[in-house]
Amino acid sequence: MFAVVKTGAKQYKVAAGDVIKVEKLDGDAGAKITLDHVLMVGTDKGVEVGTPTISGTVVTAEILEQSRAAKIIIFKKKRRQNYRRKNGHRQEQTVLRILEIGKAAAKKAAPKKAAPAKVAPEKAAPAKSEDTPKKPVAKKAAPKKTEAKKPAAKKAAPKKAAAPKKTAAKKPAAKKS
């Protein structure tokens, strides 16, 4: 039996007993976690593909250690510019051992608290003396929202008729001797 599990924006094909390295997950060494984003499960009977995940199926794993991956060197260079930058990075990772692939354990739903009973208006409001007359409440009209008027677009001034252009008088060509 195998499963395809999504964790840390990557997908892993796992089987019971496999040891995989994934992006850092919370937990201490020895803790058990469940991976519930199961995309596909393969058995002797066939393959079940989720849309996008298979609900009710989980992969149980044990955290072996929290470690860091090998160092990756980042080197930037621009030729003929005397520009060189060297940088390094070590990614945090978690080493997991897959224990089992199976159905999720049925979780008992916590009993929901009953909604508080509605209180009658007489009990909710403090009692008023009967001899005080009730004043009618006048509703104030909400101020009307008016859109800010945009200033009228100015029309371009009409262009004056262009006077005909005068061509420059030609000079007589110089005589050759």
Image (cartoon, grey):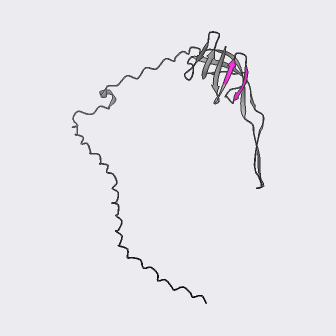
State whether residue 2 appears in this view: yes
Residue 113 drawn at (x, y percent):
46, 20
Q: Would you identify the image quadrant in which residue 96 lies?
A: top right
Which residue is located at x 37 percent, y 22 percent?
117
* On-image quarter of the C terminus: bottom right
The extreme front residue here reads 177
* Residue, far bottom: 177
Q: Looking at the picture, how far across and down is residue 122, in whole percent?
A: 29, 28
Tally the marks: 0
The residue closer to the viewer here, 70 or 129, is 70
Q: Is residue 103 visible?
A: no
43 vs 157: above or below: above
* Residue 157 x, y percent position in the rendering: 35, 68
The residue drawn where x is 61% and y is 15% is: 47
Query: What residue sits 64% from the left and 23% below the top?
Result: 5
Span highlighted in magenta in the image: 12-29
Residue 85 vertical position relative to residue 61 in the rendered view, above or below: below
Q: Residue at x 56, y 14 (%)?
A: 106
Quarter location, residue 24? top right
100 lies above or below 76: above
Q: Quadrant of residue 65?
A: top right
Which of 82/6 is in front?
Answer: 82
Is 162 left, or right, of 98 in this rendering?
left
Q: With 149 as the anchor, is 105 left or right in this view?
A: right
Give yes or no for residue 97 being in the magenta stretch. no
Query: Where is residue 42 drawn, in percent x and y?
Result: 64, 15
